[in-house]
Image (spheres, grey):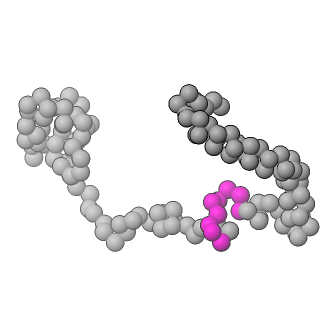
Amino acid sequence: MSIDLSGLSAKELGTLIRDAQKRKTIVAKRQPIAKARAQVIAAARKAGYTIEELFDVGAPATKTGRAPKASKAAKGTSAKAGRKLPKVAPKYRNPANADETWTGRGKQPRWLAEYTKQGRKAEEFLIQK
């Protein structure tokens, strides 16, 4: 990690040094992380829990320490569950690749946008019935 100190004034450098020294004393007073981790694991075992049970490893915790309830989207229902749209037959077909079609709904596909950019009209690509 490197910090560009060349643009700092003498006052800013002094503040930075003071803050760094404070942080250094705080870090120096802490016990090693391995020891703290071992103490937490031992306390959990003594209470009859595993770390996974206590901290719900794998799921983000909420303010209460519990895993959040699954949202509707996570349960498999869509955000617009009440509005079912029917399937629509394609109206436009790419002459270069017959597999590429478009119903006319939503964003225009790239192949059609490219043709219209070249000056052609979308009506030229309508599927004849």
Q: Is residue 36 magenta?
A: no
Q: Quadrant of residue 61?
A: bottom right
- Report x, y in % for residue 25: 80, 47
Depth check, front residue: 28 or 70: 28
Position of residue 79 relative to residue 128, above or below, is: below
* Viewport quadrant of the N terminus: top right
Q: Quadrant of residue 55?
A: bottom right
- Report x, y in % for residue 126: 11, 42
Depth check, front residue: 31 or 62: 31
Q: Which residues are magenta?
A: 56-64
What is the chief secondary structure element of the magenta stretch?
A: loop
Query: What residue is at 56 percent from the left and 27 percent from the top?
Result: 6
Q: Is residue 65 left or right of residue 128?
A: right
- Report x, y in % for residue 33: 83, 48
- Report x, y in % for residue 102: 22, 44
Task: Report whether residue 92 is seen.
Answer: yes
Position of residue 98 relative to residue 79, above or below, is: above
Query: What residue is at 44 percent from the left and 66 percent from the top?
Result: 77
Position of residue 52 relative to residue 113, above or below, is: below
